[in-house]
Image (cartoon, rainbow, N blue to C red):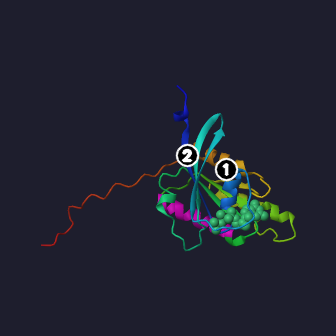
């Protein structure tokens, strides 16, 4: 009998520098609204069902506090996670550089060659205004994604441009299967026969 139990659950974690628009991206997707004010995130979990190729995926989307080069990737942001969304702002070169930094930390943590991942260039609407100009070209964004075997898209949470695409692409990357993984807690180490004891 088909029911809610047939929904496939997928956990997606959204990472990137501070203020690149992670929360705005998620809230536009889940609640269909945009807030101009900036409230730094501590951590928040959201739920939304995503339909991909006729299948419904119940997504848990984790909004994280922004990272910098000194941030240590938290195990809860990797263990049990199916896919990653790494966000930079097209108007911030620093935030773009941070994507590779975060990607490498995830790869190191999980010991895989690649991960199901979407790289997102956010705030494209800013390019239409007089204020900040583009600091990261589309070519650079696409190139970064290609070298990391990730999907890539540019978005605007403010204009609601390409927002649902981010999560559909993420499900697509997860469902590719070849690189999919769910890292489980490692079993506790077995005591070594050569370990010493204090007499
Ligand atoms: N113009 C424009 N501003 C945006 C967009 N997305 C987010 N912002 C603004 O950028 C600021 C930061 O947005 P957040 O979504 O809070 O950024 P964040 O990445 O979650 O920030 P942290 O919680 O610090 O990691 C807010 O003032 C948003 O209104 C966008 O697509 N266009």
Query: Circle 1 sits on which residue?
Result: 30
Res 181 label: none
Q: Is residue 20 visible?
A: no
In this rendering, the answer to whether 105 lies above or below 169 is below
The quarter of the image that holds ligand 1 is bottom right
Query: Circle 2 sits on which residue?
Result: 10
Residue 16 lies in magenta, yes or no?
Answer: no
Q: Residue at x 52, y 59 (%)?
A: 77
Compare residues 52 and 157 and report the one nearer the observer.
Answer: 157
Task: Tell which residue pokes out farthest to the left in this image.
Answer: 199
Compare residues 154 and 9 and report the one nearer the observer.
Answer: 9
Query: Which region is colored magenta?
Result: 95-110
Q: Is residue 180 visible?
A: yes
Q: Residue at x 53, y 61 (%)?
A: 106
Decide which of tag 1 and tag 2 comes sooner along the chain: 2
Image spot of residue 167 (x, y percent): 66, 49
Q: Residue at x 32, y 57 (%)?
A: 188
């Amino acid at each position: 009998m088909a029911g809610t139990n047939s929904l496939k659950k997928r956990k997606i974690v959204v990472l990137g520098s501070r203020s690149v628009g992670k929360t705005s991206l998620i809230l536009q997707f889940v609640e269909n609204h945009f807030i101009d004010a900036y409230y730094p995130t501590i951590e928040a979990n959201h739920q939304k069902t995503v339909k991909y190729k006729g299948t419904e995926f119940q997504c848990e989307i984790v909004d994280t506090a922004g990272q910098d080069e000194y941030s240590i990737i938290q195990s809860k942001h990797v263990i049990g996670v199916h896919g990653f969304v790494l966000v930079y702002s097209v108007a911030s070169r620093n935030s773009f550089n941070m994507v590779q930094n975060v990607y490498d930390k995830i790869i190191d943590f999980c010991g895989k060659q690649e991960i199901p991942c979407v790289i997102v260039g956010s705030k494209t609407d800013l390019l239409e205004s007089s204020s900040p100009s583009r600091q990261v070209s589309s070519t650079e964004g696409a190139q970064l994604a290609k070298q990391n075997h990730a999907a890539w898209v540019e978005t605007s949470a403010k204009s609601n441009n390409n927002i649902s695409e981010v999560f559909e692409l993420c499900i697509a990357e997860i469902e590719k299967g070849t690189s999919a993984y769910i890292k489980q807690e490692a079993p506790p180490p077995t005591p070594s026969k050569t370990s010493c004891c204090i007499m």
